Every structure is written in structure tokens, then in C-alpha cells.
Amino acid sequence: MWAVARRPRWIAALALALGIAAAFAALGQWQLERSFASGDIVTRETEKAVPLDELARPGAPMQAAWDGQLVTVEGEFVADDFLVIGDRFHDGTPGYWVLGHLVTTEGVGLAAALGWAENESDAVRVSEELAAEAAQVDANRQLVALEGRYAQGEGPQDSDLEGGRLTTVSPPALVNIWSQFDEAGTFGGYLIVDEAVDGLESIDAPIPSGEVEINWLNIFYAVEWAVFAGFAVFLWWRLVKDAWELEVEEAAAAASGESAPSGGELN
């Protein structure tokens, strides 16, 4: 059998099989690396505040590696765009956030969560006070400086939106609610300020978890690629064995035909 395997055609076939196996092994390695979601996300310095415009770009999807990063930003609040967001939990207690529309010095829109209140009436009162204050600030053109965690935007709201009740922080949806359109674009995430405004409690925004998360589906795919790599080599071995067995059978048949007596020969 190995004499058959050393023939040029089967050596070339082996090289092809090994090349295919190597490609499958590389794909398996890639899937395996994607199975562990700690890596770049949890090893970055999330507690060192960086300017938001150095981290993100308006209109671009927010990367998971940015979620929870401390950032700084300057801008002005739009007086008519303070909103109250419901179904916000703080230490297990449901309540409300006050959300502001900040326009940065570059003209980019940013949703900023300014604090939490247990009662809706308190949140509404604070939002009205902030709106009045922002209207006065607009006249004096004074910037506000904020620091907090940059969080990934939530999905669009699927309930009671027409009734005026907001329960999610979705920047793409907020663009349709805000009174002012930001020509320079809007950030895909939103800011949770470190220190709440007067009358509200600071929102709980913990440090991003450093635990390793395993994607078992990717591990399954990695195992599949390893099986495919092994099958490529097995297929070559099976073809060589079949060719060798065929030659053995043909040789045996030829030998049997030569030794058989002639049909017309008399004993």
C-alpha cells in the first residue's frame, strides 16, 4: 500500500489534502479565539477618562470595547429636549431617569443620563428645572463639562411609545423625538454622568466586568473545522487504500486466469 502512496499522483494528492487540512485548522483556531470574549474589552483602562471624540465617531456603530469607558465631553444642553425615561432600576428599586440632549462643541448630539429618581413627579420637576436653566445658559453661551461612562445604546422601544411613555435609551429613536436636529450627527451610545444633578441620585454604573465569557457555539464550530481537517487526510488515505486494493484484486484475477486450465484441454 505504501508503495502506491509514494507514487507522484498520490504525493500530490497528499499535499493538496494537507493544504486543505491546514486551511480548516486555521478556521478552527479563529473560531476558538472568538469563543473567549474577555480580551481587548476587559483589559483596557476603562477608569482613565478620555475625550469622547477621541473614542467614538458620530453615526458609526458603537463597538463593544467602548462600553463602560469613562469619558469627558463639553457642550450645551437643548432646553426643549429633557426627557423622563421610565423602568430604570436602582439597587432593585424601579424609578426614572432624566435624560438630556447635549450638543458638543463639534455640533454632535449626545444623550446624557443625568440622574435617577424613584418618583416620576420628582424626575419631571428636575427636568423642567433643567430646561429653564438651559434656556438661560443658551442666552449666555456657557458650556457644561461632563464626565461619566459611555454606554451602549439600547434597542428601540416596542411598547407605549405613542402614549408618550419612554422606557429605553435608543439614540437613533431619540433623534426623531428631539426638537433639534444635529447636522454633525449623533453618537451611537449615551453618557451616564458620574455625579447626578441636584434633586436626583447618581445612576448605578459599575466598572465593566473582567470575567471571561465563553461562546460555546464558536467552540462547536472550532471542533467542526478540526473534524473537517482530519477528514481531508482520511479521505486521501481511503483513496490510496482503495487504489491499492483494486491493484491487488486485478493482480489476483490475472494470476488466477493464467493458472486456470484451458476449456478445450482433456485430462
Image (tube, helix red, strand yellow):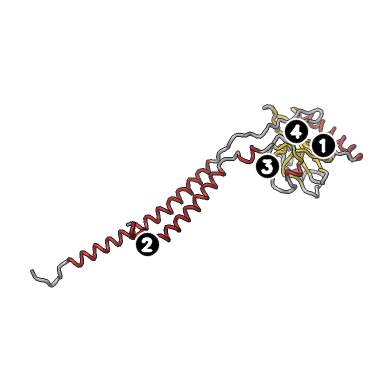
Q: Residue at x 55, y 41 (%)?
A: 215
Residue 123 in the figure: left or right of residue 209: right
> In this rendering, is residue 265 above or below 131?
below
Measured as percent of width and height from the top left, residue 102 is found at 80, 40
Nearer-the-camera pick, 231 or 124? 231
Q: Nearer the viewer, mark 3 or mark 2?
A: 2
Q: Which image quadrant for residue 109?
A: top right
Tag 3 secondary structure: loop
Look at mark 4 in the image and give the residue it sits on. Answer: 97
Q: Residue furthest bottom?
A: 264
Distance from Cα at disc 1 to Cα at disc 4: 20 Å
Choose the circle earlier in sequence order: 3 or 4.
Answer: 4
Q: Which mark is residue 61?
A: none
Q: Amino acid at mark 1?
A: Ala
Q: Residue at x 80, y 32 (%)?
A: 124
Nearer-the-camera pick, 11 or 168? 11
Q: Which mark is residue 7?
A: 2
Choose the circle earlier in sequence order: 1 or 2.
Answer: 2
> In this rendering, is residue 145 above or below 93?
below
Q: Nearer the viewer, mark 1 or mark 3?
A: 1
Residue 60 in the figure: left or right of residue 224: right
